[in-house]
Amino acid sequence: MRTLLVAAVAAALFGSGPRVNARHSPDGRWLLYQTNPGGAGSIGADGMPLWARHTDGGKAILVEPQVLGWPDFVQRCGDGFVVSAGLDRYVSARKHVDLVRPPAWRPVDVSHDARYSWFSAACSSDGRWIAATRTANREEGRFDSAERSIWLLASDGSSRRLLAGTPDRSDEAPRWSADGRFVTYYEHATHTNARVLAYTVDVRSGRRYGPLATLQDGIGYYGHQTFRGLPLLGKTIAVDPGHNGANWAHPAEINRLVDAGGFRKACDTTGASTNDGYSEATYNFDVATRLTRILRREGARVVLTRTSNEGVGPCIDERAAIGNRAHADAAISIHADGGPPGGRGFEVIYKPQAPASRTLALAVRQAFAAITGEPYSTYVGRDGLDVRTDLGGLNLSVVPKVLIETANMRNATDARRLESAAYRQREAVALARGLEAFLS
């Protein structure tokens, strides 16, 4: 009898069983953790109790009696957490989405519909909205999935609406962009081992972009599918290949003056070329195309300022506007310089008083130098960096943006490198790694 009493007191104070999956609350004052009273070993998916305890000590609070494992079923939301909870081990059997907050940690049901199962909830950065997966209630009894959809739930429980639901498909695993504008999710056939497509949807307009990438689902457990992580999933990147292939044939159009950020400047220029006649416009577009393929494979939504090398422009003001309208997380303008034949090397340019752009420049510089082996420019800038106020494409950008002069096309050594397709692929990989480092 005494043993049972001690066990009951310990459970009330600390939660029974070993503690697992511990996380601090956003304010750092509480510890949220699960306990494994039965010693469940099946991927922690058996529905373990969720507890909260103040970091100064005191009695533990039982938040939810049964919650599946982190991070798919417990994630931060505002000053608390959003939890997918329910008294069954299967995600498709009577799950609901609760919002739990300190100090009471009393669950508030924000899904409000017991006819369906709700799980894998993700919270927007401002804590106002929750994107959650919905499916029909059913006892699966095996590793499987069913038709699923993504819903947008108000965190105060006041409203909900369908965000993504493809008939006869599974839409699940929502993730928010940093600015709270887009939700990225996976779509696949309603069974395991299916081809998976990644999409992004604008939560304001409902417009869907994609597919961003194709991949395979991973191991399923208790009706929940896992997916291989994509480092740039949910990110938007603007890629700006400098100049255009037909600029030279339209002098009046490219010499037209446009706003360059408080002063007027020519719409565009023809760009440089190697002594062999390999044009900068062609080079820029090739590297940009290679970079775009890599970024999309990594889950990014990519917007290009031009999609061919046979046109004119766009003007420098429109190039900046394309990235701004897309709410890009980062933007990069790809160029090669036409400097003195005796000089070589690359530089990354950003506008002054733009801390995020400087951080992006540092990330791109480090990756580009390490992967390509190209030295810093010997004739312009300093240590591979330059700050300029005369470039309209940078001045007018309201998103983090840099311009890279990848080499000197007038230098014989640099020109040989730029004319190599294998080297251009290395450059694209380097730029992708720099963008990924900035956005991670």
Image (cartoon, grey):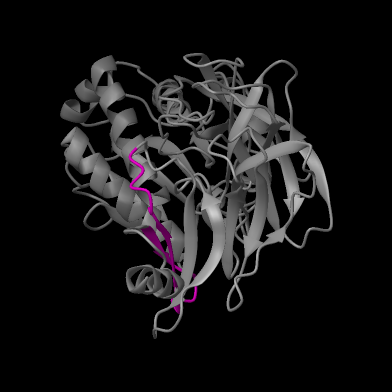
Tell me if residue 403 can be seen: yes
Quadrant assignment, res 7: bottom left
Using residue 310 as the reference point, say whether residue 258 is left or right of it: right
In the depicted view, which residue is nearer to us: 438 or 304?
438
Instruction: Reply above or below: 285 against 368.
Output: above
> Looking at the picture, how far across and down is residue 82, in whole percent?
60, 57
The residue that appears at 21% across and 24% down in the rendered structure is 417
Residue 291, given in percent of the width and then of the height, sits at 41, 28
The answer to whether any part of residue 389 appears in the image is no
Residue 153, compared with residue 255, is above or below; it is below
Q: Nearer the viewer, residue 147 or 96?
A: 96
In the image, residue 160 lies in the stretch drawn in magenta: no
In this rendered view, identify the residue nearer to me: 156 or 289: 156
Where's residue 116, x and y in %? 74, 36
Q: How many marks?
A: 0
Side (left or right) of 152 relative to 323? right
- Location of residue 150 by image quarter: top right
Q: Residue furthest front?
A: 1
Stretch of the chain drawn in magenta: 21-41
Q: Is residue 257 above or below residue 126?
A: above
**Image quarter of the N terminus:** bottom left
Residue 28 sits inside the magenta stretch = yes
Q: Is residue 315 left or right of residue 420?
A: right
Quadrant in which residue 11 is drawn: bottom left
Figure check: 308 above or below 296: above
Residue 104, x across and y down, in percent: 61, 76
